[in-house]
Image (cartoon, helix red, strand yellow):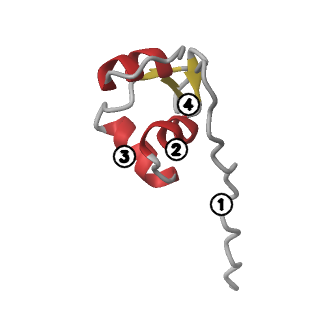
């Protein structure tokens, strides 16, 4: 039995969000915009509840930008 090489996971690059921030965003986008964090660090921040999230399925989550900004003292509209 031969082992096949696993394909690397293809992830979408995070995009920096512009103000006014949308109500929801992908977790890597929120992490990059608010914390200059990469993909892994963004999900670590979400697990520690620094980035506020909402579950949209069994495994999918979105970042809630306005509550996260309120936690940090940032105005999401200006």
Q: Helix, strand, or loop for circle 1?
A: loop
Q: Residue at x 49, y 18 (%)?
A: 76
Q: Position of residue 22 (x, y in %)?
A: 61, 18
Q: Which residue is mark 4?
A: 60
Of label 1 and label 3, which has the lower sequence position? Answer: 1
Q: CA distance from mark 3 to mark 4?
A: 15 Å
Of label 1 and label 4, which has the lower sequence position? Answer: 1
Q: CA distance from mark 1 to mark 2?
A: 20 Å
Q: Which residue is mark 3?
A: 44
Of label 2 and label 3, which has the lower sequence position? Answer: 2
Q: Which residue is mark 1?
A: 9
Which of the pair 54/4 is nearer the observer? 54
Q: Quadrant of the N terminus?
A: bottom right
Crowding near pointer 3: few (<14 within 10 Å), some, many (20+)?
some
Q: Can you tell which of label 1 and label 3 is closer to the viewer? A: 3
Of label 2 and label 4, which has the lower sequence position? Answer: 2
Tell whether 9 sits left or right of 44. right
Crowding near pointer 4: few (<14 within 10 Å), some, many (20+)?
few
Tell whether 42 sits left or right of 62. left
Q: Can you tell which of label 3 and label 4 is closer to the viewer? A: 3
How many circles with numbers are drawn on the protein?
Answer: 4
Q: Can you tell which of label 1 and label 2 is closer to the viewer? A: 2
Q: CA distance from mark 2 to mark 3?
A: 13 Å
Q: Which residue is mark 2?
A: 32
Which of the pair 72/56 is nearer the observer? 72
The answer to whether mark 2 and mark 4 are in CB contact below 8 A is no
Q: CA distance from mark 2 to mark 4?
A: 18 Å
């Amino acid at each position: 039995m031969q082992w096949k090489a696993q394909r690397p996971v293809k992830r979408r690059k995070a995009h920096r969000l512009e103000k006014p921030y949308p109500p929801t965003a992908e977790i890597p986008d929120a992490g990059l915009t608010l914390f200059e964090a990469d993909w892994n660090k963004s999900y670590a921040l979400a697990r520690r509840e620094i980035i506020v999230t909402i579950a949209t399925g069994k495994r999918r989550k979105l970042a809630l930008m306005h509550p996260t900004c309120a936690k940090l003292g940032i105005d999401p509209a200006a």
